[in-house]
Image (cartoon, rainbow, N blue to C red):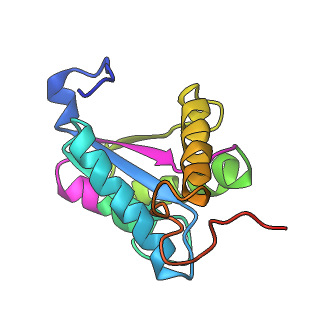
Amino acid sequence: MNDVELTIEEHDLAHTGVIVVDHGSRRSASNHMLEEFVCGFVGFSDFEIVEPAHMELAEPSIGTAFDRCVARGAKRVVVCPYFLLPGKHWDEDIPALVAGAAKRHPGVKYMVTAPIGLHPMMREVIASRIDYCLQHVDGGVNECESCQGTGRCKLQG
């Protein structure tokens, strides 16, 4: 595994499905960003079964992603909210949607992980984003992947 050690045995990886779930948006560009992230995660991790999902407003839904994981051989499914902080979606909505999807697949175990939140690496992510955006407004680099073409990354006032 790249830079991250897992305690999951090799044979378990082949039967572990991972669903990375965000809120979902009416904007297809936002939903596409999750798909791009998941593609990058697939290349980074040793998990063989990884699917994107949106909690609402867009496909694939959590149910669709869960079905896809099982169809690809998952015997357990780990749902990772692509959310910063805990809240109602993490506490109630996502677990209910996952439980509903799991009912269609008796014997498949599942869990919902904690949101990204207070993970120690978030400090590095925030610092990196701020540094990059400041470099952009100073003319040193192009807009980031989120702001590209929007003209939003500029100092105001």
**Location of residue 28 in the rendering, given as x and y in whole percent from the top left corner:** 46, 81
Is there any visible trace of residue 75 in the rendered image?
no
**Is residue 98 placed above or below 55 in the rendered structure?**
above
Q: Does 12 sit left or right of 125 as displayed?
A: left
Q: Quadrant of the C terminus?
A: bottom right
Q: Does 70 sit left or right of 86 as displayed?
A: left
**Magenta-colored span:** 68-85
The residue drawn where x is 18% and y is 44% is: 48
Is there any visible trace of residue 50 in the rendered image?
yes
The residue drawn where x is 33% and y is 23% is: 4
**Is residue 46 placed above or below 42 in the rendered structure?**
above
The residue drawn where x is 58% and y is 64% is: 23
The front one of 141 and 26 is 141
**Which quarter of the picture shows residue 72?**
bottom left
Q: Does 61 sit left or right of 74 as displayed?
A: right
Residue 79 drawn in magenta: yes
**Location of residue 128 in the rendering, given as x and y in whole percent from the top left corner:** 54, 40
**Which quarter of the picture shows residue 36?**
bottom left
